[in-house]
Amino acid sequence: MDLEGPICWRPRTCPATRTRKVIASWQLRLDWGRANGKIYYGNPINAYFTTTSPAAEFTTLTDPNSLVDFGTSDFAHYLTAGSCGGGALLATATGVSSCEKFKVIDLNGGDLYSGEQVYLQLGPWYVTADGGGNGAVNVNTTSPSSSGTFTVIKMNGAPGSRITHNDQIAFQASDGVHYVEAVNNGGGSVDAYATSTGPATTFVYWVSHL
């Protein structure tokens, strides 16, 4: 549903008077969405609103407390924390529960854009790539570190574009060379041995509503 109109100095008489002075125009866009069997008003999946007026444009910030799950490229599995934290990062989950819901912490705050650095947190645990890359990937530390810093890259958009629900992304390790990958595109272990992006390093960014 779209609503739009002028903003003027005399709101009670503005539509009917010749002396009105329009200082801005606006459009509020509210979308219907469905998640977990419920209908939502206000597009909670993307969790932001954007005006389309040429005179005034803004976008609200993504909720920093949103939880995200990451689907693998086989479209059958999700990244999951072994033992729900304290062990290895795996790609064996076939559904989403608390062990698959990660908080994506944008190091510079605000909305998440391709090329920005993030921490991945699940409960008290943080995801880390051993040695900053070229090794195992675990969810077994309780404080952020350089080895747990990842650059998120949007695979289905222009460099620097915003990342939202259903985007395809990759995680580059802090060494700037290696990428997080789901072995065999999902269904098994996860490591950071890959040196280029491809199906095994591509994950679907799903804002969680379970």
Image (cartoon, helix red, strand yellow):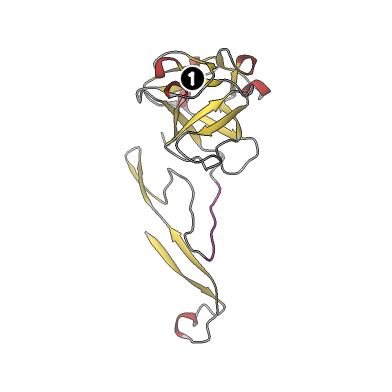
139, above or below 162, in the image: above
Q: Is residue 45 visible?
A: yes
Question: Looking at the picture, how far across and down is residue 36, in whole percent?
Answer: 35, 37
Return the x and y of residue 112 as percentages of the image width and height: 56, 40
Residue drawn where x is 54% and y is 43% of the image: 63
Q: Position of residue 152 (x, y in %)?
A: 55, 32
Q: Decide: is 159 above or below 81.
A: below
Direction left: furthest residue: 37
Instruction: Tell me: residue 18, above or below residue 176.
Output: below
Decide whether residue 24 is among the magenta residues.
no
Under mark 1, the amino acid is Glu
Q: For the image shown, how many numbered marks are present on the structure? A: 1
Q: Is residue 120 left or right of residue 28?
A: right
- The image position of residue 55, as x and y in percent, is 53, 66
Q: Residues within 10 Å of mark 1 (few under 14, many from 20)?
A: many
Q: Does the rendering let one see residue 186?
A: no
The residue that mark 1 highlights is 181
* Residue under the point 46% across and 63% down: 27
Report the residue at 59% width, 30% height from top. Answer: 151
Most common secondary structure along the magenta stretch:
loop
**Of 1 and 133, which appears nearest the observer?**
133
Left or right: where does residue 141 sit relative to residue 17? right
- Assign the C terminus to one quadrant of the image: top left
Query: Quadrant location of the N terminus?
Result: bottom left
Quadrant of residue 110 within the rendered picture: top right
Check the image and name the residue furthest to the bottom: 18
- Residue name at image x 49 percent, y 58 percent: 51
- In the visual, does 130 lie left or right of 25? right
Looking at the rendered structure, the secondary structure element under dot 1 is strand
Magenta-drawn stretch contains 60? yes
- Tell me where the magenta segment starts and ends, as one range: 55-61
